[in-house]
Amino acid sequence: MTSPAPPIRLLLADDHPVVRAGLRAVLETEPGFEVVADVPTAEEAVELAGRCAVDVVLMDLQFGGRMLGSQATAAITARAGAPRVLVLTTYDTDADILAAIEAGATGYLLKDAPPEELAAAVRTAAAGKSALAPTIALRLMDRMRAPATALSRRETEVLQLVADGLSNAAISKRLFLSQATVKSHLVHIYSKLGVDSRTSAVAAATAKGLIRR
Amino acid sequence: MTSPAPPIRLLLADDHPVVRAGLRAVLETEPGFEVVADVPTAEEAVELAGRCAVDVVLMDLQFGGRMLGSQATAAITARAGAPRVLVLTTYDTDADILAAIEAGATGYLLKDAPPEELAAAVRTAAAGKSALAPTIALRLMDRMRAPATALSRRETEVLQLVADGLSNAAISKRLFLSQATVKSHLVHIYSKLGVDSRTSAVAAATAKGLIRR
DNA sequence: TCGGGCATCAACCGAAGGGTTGATGCCGGG
DNA sequence: CCCGGCATCAACCCTTCGGTTGATGCCCGA
């Protein structure tokens, strides 16, 4: 017999009280887990992750306004000896996923995950290995397999402004570009998405999760 | 002393295991509540609401695909002696709210509601009174106060197709209209929303929750 | 009954957006 | 080292969209 393994210490960050209660209920019944605290804001998550000894932070991406989950993730993982961050969100847009991964998240789960999958992901993350939900992994694979669909950083930026309802002239001013450049980006976007107008580009990109809203 | 009041019998319907667990945890600690069952699909909610003696159904609006929460709500409230349905969702688009109310929902709550508000709403619903989250009530008030912002049925239909990326020509064919009529609707939509282009109309309407996606 | 909102359509015009060609500079990988 | 992708811009043409005016019919409520 080995000595009993120390429990995995967890911090829950989500602005929905019901979700926090649910995660607590699901994870505390699981053996080997200890929920140290749950907080309703990204700021408190950063704060507590620094002060308490925590192994894994379960982090929502969308908090009501202010700091984003991805920013909090970056702030937490930047420190030495930082806990692992497991992003847990409702949405699965490319932008969110990439932002979380770039911010140093160890894993990415969707909130509709069954309890077993959730527990398994936490253990995987605690061990320092990356834990991606099947849906997410699939999306990343798609992105690799079909690079034609992947918009460049600048293209995404332009398309997001289009989705916000800006005209080419407004976009060019906002990004300090000529209208010609904006149009050039749009033409590339159209061909990558297989569409032929700004509105259908927005529709297609929204459907694929390339942009937000 | 009166005899002890019978507990309010609840049925939870949500496709997220974590949310079901959270609602259970929050409501079972509250005195006077009894969670009869929780189900992951709208179909099972309709089924169980008919078979068990339930006072209030907590119903999500978005289930992974298939039957919508609003349809399930309509199916449940259609029967005689039906339980009250309290809609509990993440989103607050006008379309969703109106669909739920038309389907016979007794109340409409957002998932970020604090536990006390949730419990209070359940009691209110059990008593047969309508329970609207402050945000929702505000939105309905706005809708009443500024009828200029409320798009007509036909206008919403046209704008939804615009949001789907269709051109005026495509919309006119889809709806068996002339392009002139489509343009006419769009002009009215623009003035109601205070915008001046199709893309900004889509952005504004999405922000206001007038259309879906 | 009469006005007003809704829905429908026509004709017209100017402007914005869409499509092409062509060109430059930068950077990173084979 | 050179090719290719990315980002930038210009000039051009044509289509679609945006905006106006004006008109018809319907239905509802004052």
Image: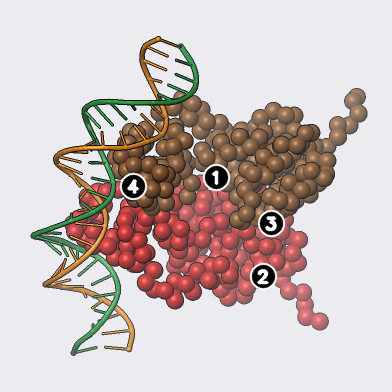
Chain colours: A red, B brown, C orange, D green
- The tag earlier along the polypeptide, 4 or 1, is 1
The type of residue carrying mark 2 is: Ala
Residue closest to the eye, A41 or B94: B94
Q: Nearer the viewer, mark 2 or mark 1?
A: 1
Q: In the drawing, does residue B135 fall left or right of residue B201?
A: right
Residue A44, percent across and down? 54, 52
Vertical side of A145 occupied by B136: above or below: above
Per the image, the residue denoted by label 3 is B17
Checking the image for residue A196, the label placed there is none
B147 to B187, vertically: above or below = above
**Distance between mark 4 and mark 2 Cα atoms:** 50 Å
Q: Secondary structure at mark 3?
A: helix
Number of the label disc, if any, that sits on residue B168: 4
As shown in the figure, which amino acid type bears the numbered disc 1? Answer: Tyr
Q: Is residue B96 visible?
A: yes
Q: Residue at x 62, y 54 (%)?
A: B66
- In what element is the residue under mark 1? loop
Crowding at mark 1 (Cα within 10 Å: few <14, some 14-19, many 20+): some
Per the rendering, the mark at residue B91 is 1
Find out whether the residues at labels 4 and 2 contact each other: C-beta distance under 8 Å. no
